[in-house]
Image: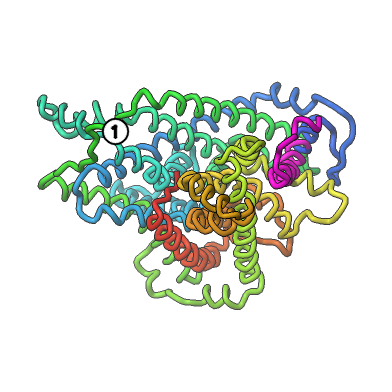
Amino acid sequence: MIRVFTGWSPIVLLLIAILLVLIVPPLYFLLKTSLYTTSADGSFGDFTFEYYRDLFSSPRFFSHFFNSALFAGGSAVLAIALGAVQAWIVERTDTPLRQYVFLLAVVSLGIPHVLYTVAWLLILGKGGPVNLFLMGLLGTDMPVLSVNSLWGMILIEGMIWAPLGFLLLSSVFRLSDVAFEEAAMMSGAGLFTTFRRITLKLATPAVLALLLLVCIRAFEAFDIPALVGSAGGVSVLTTDIFESIRKDLPSNYGQAGAFSVILMLLVVILLLVHHRLLKHAERYQTITGKGYRPHVTRLGKWRYITASVLGLFFLVLLVLPVGIIMLASLLPFYDGVRAELFDRLTLDNYRLVAASPSFRGAILNTIVMGAATATVVCLLTAGSAWLSVRRYKGGWLLDQLATLPLIFPAIVLGVAFLQLFVNAPFAIYGTLSSLIIAAVVQYLPYGMRFCYAGAMQIHRELEEAAEMSGAKRYATYFRIVLPLIAPAVATSWLFVMLMSVRAVAMPILLTGPRSQVVAVTLFDLWGNGQITSLAAVGVCWTALMMGIGLVFYRTARRYGLTVS
């Protein structure tokens, strides 16, 4: 056994040990939870397959699985469609002001999913402006639209992922050779025919891979099914997991574990399909060393129409949801959008937020959790990425271990760590430390990809020159490598910070009275009907996160790093 590790650096072995300690225990406890009876305190009893038998014998499982598949597929198609249109306009045309779409897409990452969902519930709800307009138009007293449905879930989830779809697809259209499109147009094809039959077909593998990626993320979504679907009687697998723990009395940990294992296996299958799609992407390569030239299409008078399309996206995806939340935050109570509400505007909700220890504590906890998570992730992945890129012995294993948490949907990871912390020999469940540990595992793959991209840009000759000058390897890393990959590490830190503080699926299972975070606070406020307080907290938090998003955008653009 010792011979296997001969020649492996102690640093590699240390990092592998740390990653194994972080990843293996929650996976073990998740599997054990699904295969053993559990008592009310979370301790394990007898071995059993009962939870799996109950799962597959229940018609509810297959119905909810079908709902999950429709929700994920519909959301992915909508998100990629919206993202593809924006990416093509920005990257392949001379539309005015198109360069600002990148900024808006990145800044939108600062809006918590819970807040964005609530905004659209207010817009499309029974007393929302859309229903009021349709009721007046059709002369009816009953709401025309019911957003608490599967189509409402798909619409909101699709719009949430549209900015990321744009960011990922923009590089695809930017790097596609224009010669094929020019040949089509010279043969008589129109602009939109060329886009449909040439541009999109060349982008097929990337579009399919991203479609599947968004589908995976939507499949594991919890906040929108819980906030939108539950009120309309629409359940999916993630809400079943949550209800097994939080709503069943006593908590049915075994059923939640079985649901979680099945959901995790489904995600693994989807990730394998995603990997196979990427393996065959070379069939569609158009960039070669000879003759490639990026180019934008001059639209003439049509560019004002495409500018209007971008303006419409900006209005719908950002202005309307942020605007309705800001309006709600200025009202003493929210009862729909009406003309007389402007006579009731007040700043009392913001005074309440400023004076409330619980709100201030949630904001402080979230900042600490986000900063600590991002810092630990960067510390682990900066060295792991360099060792992997330089192909040190064991470096490949570091890359695989750091990427492994992708198989865990957020709520499944929450169930796994819940069981781990409940059965730990020391009191950690419900503390801020438990949230940080779980978040570090969840966001390791994202930190690894950013740092790996930064390390790939450094030529080996710089390190060889340092070694020839007598520098030790650790000195070379700290004095040459680390300063050069610092922009990638900084971008990684900002991205992980943004992502970790907006999540609700995992923290909702792990928070305690003294470790409340903003996303969970917003979720609870909505459940309690405190819409105006929710809006005020959301506006304050979104303003802060949009500032961080702006810093992330400027850092990433300056050093040529992308979200993908």
In which quadrant will I find the C terminus?
top left
Q: Is residue 499 left or right of residue 8?
A: left
Residue ranking furthest to the front: 469
Name the amino acid, label 1.
Gly
Magenta-colored span: 1-28
Near-viewer residue (388 or 335):
388
- Say which residue appears at 64% left-offset and 43% top-offset: 411
Q: Secondary structure at mark 1?
A: loop
Q: Is residue 429 above or below residue 546?
A: above
Tell me if residue 6 is in the magenta stretch. Answer: yes
- At 45% from the left edge and 39% from the top edge, which residue is drawn? 154
Residue under numbered circle 1: 289
Question: Is residue 163 placed above or below 358 in the rendered structure?
Answer: above
Q: Main secondary structure of the magenta part?
A: helix
Please report the residue visible at 40 percent of the width from the left and 60 percent of the height from the top: 554
Res. 324 visible in picture: no
- In the image, is 539 to the left or to the right of 40? left
Residue 103's quadrant in the figure? bottom left
Residue 58 is situated, as x and y percent measured from the top left of the image, at 69, 24
Magenta residue check for 134: no
Front position in the image: 313 or 421: 421
